[in-house]
Image (cartoon, helix red, strand yellow):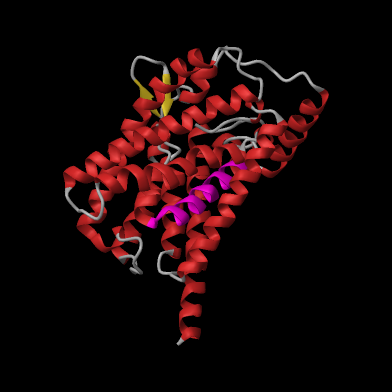
Amino acid sequence: MHMADALLSPVVGGAFWIVSGVLIGYSAKKIGQEGDHSRTPLMGVLGAFIFAAQMINFSIPGTGSSGHLGGGLLLSILLGPYRAFITLASVLVIQCMFFADGGILALGCNIFNLAFFPAFITYPLIYKKIAGESLQQTRIFGGSIAAAVVGLLAGASSVIFQTIISGVSELPFLTFVMFMLPIHTGIGIVEGLVTFAVVSFVVKASPGMLKNNVAVKPDKKVLITFVVMAIITAGVLSLFASSYPDGLEWSIEKTSATFTGKFSQIVHGTLQAVQEKIAFLPDYSFKPDALHGKTPELAATSVAGVTGCLIFLFVAIVAAIIVRLKTQKAR
């Protein structure tokens, strides 16, 4: 559900840059007030895992489209809403800047659509109400499915709203909804199942991690498991991802107009040029001129996936060092 710049007017894209920036600042402030740095390394490790998981597009039967894990709900369960929002925002920034996945203008919208709803709406109001602090499998299952589906539908509805107020969609609102929501209901169910599976693993391995309002040092075995899962997913499983277009792309195909205003064209063209210069593995592949026009796609996908994971693991290591130094200084 990564939006491209072509779906947004500069005004709408810029407005959601501001909204998402405010939410990042608010989340950082709340984390600072908590004074708990025990989960900071875990943010980097889970960021690597979600980055890898989002590379796996799975087919939606009967539609010719595909979907991928959002990860916001899972991050919220394991990190709490504020750390989850910042972690997922970091994933989206790296995807956008280094891999040209989603547009620069659309970055604020993508952060809002994918991170705001699971972190601040469906996690506290649905998952927590159903699962609470319980470690019962049935309650975790119910909470995961319900929160994931509602979160994906809310995000999809937000995409519809942003596209329509940008003046891009040529379809009436209700018609656009009929395209978007059924697809994202299916994606939400899959996300709920994956979330349930991962949370169930954590319940058995380190149940204290689910109490995100308590300082709990993440279990080393759990951290290592997530690292291994991230590398395998990004380096190997990503090779088997569906080739069908993303559910968002499928839903808006043949339904959108193009911007004709000079200002819009200048903004879109400039941002596209900037992204092309920054992204060293655009669309998770090598640049054509890097290999004289010959791009081994499978190798490129693996390299891109592992590279993205290593970026987050580097962040996790640096964060762990900083936390340790702060702890020693406090003593």
**Residue 84 at least partly seen:** yes
Q: Is residue 64 left or right of residue 209?
A: right
Q: Is residue 169 left or right of residue 229?
A: right
Residue 247 in the image: x percent, y percent?
46, 24
Q: Nearer the viewer, residue 95 or 149?
A: 149
Q: Which residues are magenta?
A: 79-96
Residue 246 in the image: x percent, y percent?
48, 26
Count of picture labels = 0
- As drawn, the residue found furthest toward the bottom would be 331
Main secondary structure type of the part rendered in magenta:
helix
Which residue is rendered at x = 74% and y = 40% of the image?
274
- As drawn, the residue found furthest toward the right would be 262
Q: Nearer the viewer, residue 316 or 208?
A: 208
Q: Quadrant of residue 196?
A: top left
Magenta span has 231? no
Which residue is rendered at x = 39% and y = 51% of the image?
76
Which residue is rendered at x = 41% and y = 16% of the image?
64
Q: Is residue 51 above or below residue 102?
A: below
Q: Quadrant of residue 6?
A: top right
Residue 143 in the image: x percent, y percent?
27, 42
Q: Nearer the viewer, residue 178 or 174?
A: 174
